[in-house]
Image (tube, coloured by chain):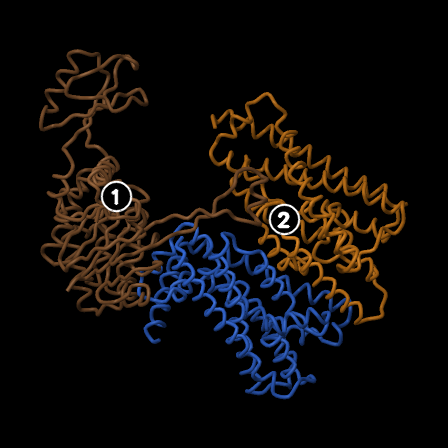
Amino acid sequence: MRSYRAIVSARFRMLLQYRAAAAAGFGTQLFWGLIRVMIFEAFYRSTTAAQPMTLPQVVDYIWLGQATFVMTLTYYMDLDIMAMVRSGTVVYELLRPLDLYALWFSRSVASRAAPTLLRALPMLAVAGLFFGLRPPASAASGAAWLLSLAGALLLSCAISTLLSVSLLWTIAGEGLSQIVGFAGMLLSGMVIPLPLFPDWAQAVLNVLPFRGLLDIPARLYSGNLPPSEAFPLFVHQLAWTGGLVALGRLLLARGTRRLVVQGG
Amino acid sequence: MPQIVVEDLKKTFRVAERQPGLWGACRGLFARRQRIVHALDGISFSVQPGELVGYIGPNGAGKSTTVKILAGILVPDSGRCEVLGRVPWRERVATVAQIGAVFGQRTQLWWDLPVIESFDLLREIYRVPTASYVRVRDELIEMLDLAPLLDVPVRQLSLGQRMRCDLTASLLHSPSLVYLDEPTIGLDAVSKLALRGFIRRMNQDRGVTVLLTTHDMDDIEALCSRVIVISQGRILSDGTLQELRSRVTPERWLIVALVEPDGEISDPDAPIIKRTGGRVYLRFDPGRVSAADLIGRIASRHAIRDLFVESPPIEEMVARIYREEAACGHTGR
Amino acid sequence: MRDDIRLYLRYVGVSVRGQMQYPASFIMLSIGHLLATGGEFLGIWALIHRFGSLRGWSLAEVGLLYGIVSIAFSISDATSRGFDAFAGMLKRGDFDRVLLRPRSSALQLAGQELTMRRVGRLSQALAVLLWSASALGAIWSPIKAALVAGAILGGACLFFGLIVLQATTAFLTTESLEIFNTVTYGGVETAQFPLSIYRPWFRRFFTAVIPLAFVSYFPALAILNRPAPPVLPWVAPLAGLIFLAIALRVWHFGVRHYCSTGS
């Protein structure tokens, strides 16, 4: 586990470059994707031994990761929420007769939707035309992929909303979001496709929620995980999403009561 | 041998105009519309060693543009300029090594460092020989009563304290010429007096030439024997303070807030200039009617909530000069 | 020149003392930085372990490249904060004060901060370099050791030059251009692996446009006794110094432009 802890470093730096959830430079991502494709190409050419993924599947994986990066892997806290908590005005939000969690969750969804489309479509096009991205392995794979993308979006929003809620408990939430961002990048397969991690790590990786962000959709797309196995994977995504939503709502309710009791 | 010579200095800026709305922003990416601002339109003056010159004018008149050119950090479009015998922008380092500058809004000290460390760092930057540095520094510390502040980080100083430290910092390398840009802005009355006293001593005892840009007429009255008035890039007046005063008829404003905001108010000696913000602005000549008399008359005849007596802002005075100049057919030189 | 160095050292002293005022924070940040960067090589290890080699380059050989590039970058990263943050300084109008002082603006910006926590990356890269050096055993000689030092120095100059160029663009646009971050961090990533594995146009970019290959790949070839052009690897690190010199020229043009057009 330690050994892969932060291969992320390079990716973490990439995270640091992004100023806001939607600010990933198109060119930057193209560049990064390309470098990694070339590196993996070189690795694959260094051996004839069979691997858990084929090179073309790795290439698909990499580009899908870049294309959906904004949607799935940026946990920059909603800056408005952060400012509200710092200044204390969040109290007004909390006291409104609204379902605050639902509000924050939908903000999360909204803030990802447009930038994602803006980024993903051109990136998929360019990668498909020039850099080795293939179409989905089959119609069924494609459908499974799209469904899992929706699941990934919901999962990602559940995580980020939970992080926003955590701000009510500790202002160190900023550090927390960085750590989670870190972990998310690594454990979702963004840095190295999960199947290429050492074999003994696979069990843990398959249980954690993060694989639902990229690993599941990407492998469904390329057929590395056949459509027949899609159902349990959806369950994995939705179960974690549901659990994190429940936790988020719970913490929000507790946090609200705490604030109200303490008088802000 | 003048320390500053400015001859027919001109400077225009191109300001990109931002177009409103999303469509405008898109268009802005391709073709920026530009506005030309004539910051300086041919100004000329010279300053002799030891003078304490006030440089006044409304906002946007060209004051800071002038100072930047004199400091060598801005290049004019045309005209001649020499500071201490050098062309400032061509020999920036040599010029700047011999002048001091204080900008009221920004400090030159390091925010997180104790004051004394900022001084030491500046000594290194200005390459001041140790012996003279220690002497000058200690004299200034004593003169400005900075001893209790030396170990305090600059960010913890009050505005008045910071200004004193900034002024000291600008003198550590014993420059013969100093530019002060709004040094008293934002200070309370006591600090202003103290600072003015110090500037006067600097100039009279040590012979430091001072170019003081300010909005505050009290600064001018207290310190400057000579006043240059600039407006819209042109010099309107350059002479002693008495000369300046005599050109403008004396005037004071009485600002009245009536109990009834739209109420009637009038006085034979005080014509109304304007009504705005629930207040009535009356103009009067303190030579013809004293403020006390006028206030007494008005208060006895009307229901007053509040009132103030003020000097008209510089803009007014300058505008008046401008109009008088135009009326007399001069263009102000 | 001598008092420029003295001034720089004084700046560094001020900066270091400032950071040492919060020792706990410094230690935590350094450790965080170490962890963030430390796993990098472990990742490379794991991949080489799975695939056997990287196009015939062993782990120790890749480690040599990695060590050189990473150390060079961490040196530059630690010393270039003034330029890195220049766009903000320009926006706040604080650059005028720099120009009002009788020293070079580049020197003042260079001295603004020595970011101590980069020692995290530096130490792990050094560890990798030392391990690789010992694993490579018999190939060493004093001249080769000097070449390593030269490559590191040249690399640090190269990365510093990139940051200077990035800062210069702030005179024209108000935001730091993304592209420089891309090239810098992308460059670090790229140079950690032998250049030969990349596609031709990519190789050409990092040889001719940004002479990254000169401060990492070519010297490594010579050190590892791999086939290389005859003289080139030994003088290649100079490319980094030349790049920095060019970048500083461009910077001075930028300052002149700023003085002509005002802020």
Tell whether C157 sits left or right of A204.
left
Tell whether A160 sits left or right of B240.
right
Colour of the chain lettered A: orange
Which chain identifier belongs to the brown chain? Answer: B
Q: Position of residue B294 (x, y in %)?
A: 13, 20
Q: Secondary structure at mark 1?
A: loop
Tell whether B51 sits left or right of B126.
left
Q: Residues within 10 Å of mark 1 (few under 14, many from 20)?
A: many
Q: Residues within 10 Å of mark 2 (few under 14, many from 20)?
A: many
Q: What residue sits 16% from the left and 36% below the top? A: B248
The answer to whether A32 is drawn above or below residue A79 in the figure is below
Q: Which mark is residue B258?
A: none
Colour of the chain lettered C: blue
Type of the residue with mark 2:
Gly
Q: Exactly how many numbered labels are in the figure?
A: 2
Q: Position of residue B300 (x, y in %)?
A: 15, 12
Q: What residue sits 14% from the left and 33% below the top? A: B250
Q: Chain of mark 1?
A: B
The answer to whether B196 is drawn above or below residue B290 in the figure is below
Quadrant containing the N terminus of chain B is bottom left
User: Closest to the observer: A28 or B96?
Assistant: B96
Q: What residue sits 22% from the left and 63% below the top? A: B173
What residue did someone put label 2 on?
A: A181
Mark-to-mark CA distance, 1 and 2: 55 Å
Tell me, yes or no, whether the two marked residues, 1 and 2, touch with CB atoms within 8 Å.
no
Quick check: do tags 1 and 2 share a chain? no
The answer to whether B23 is drawn above or below residue B165 in the figure is above
Type of the residue with mark 1:
Gly
Q: Position of residue B271 (x, y in %)?
A: 20, 21
Q: What residue sits 13% from the left and 58% below the top? A: B50
Q: Which mark is residue B57?
A: 1
Q: Chain of mark 2?
A: A
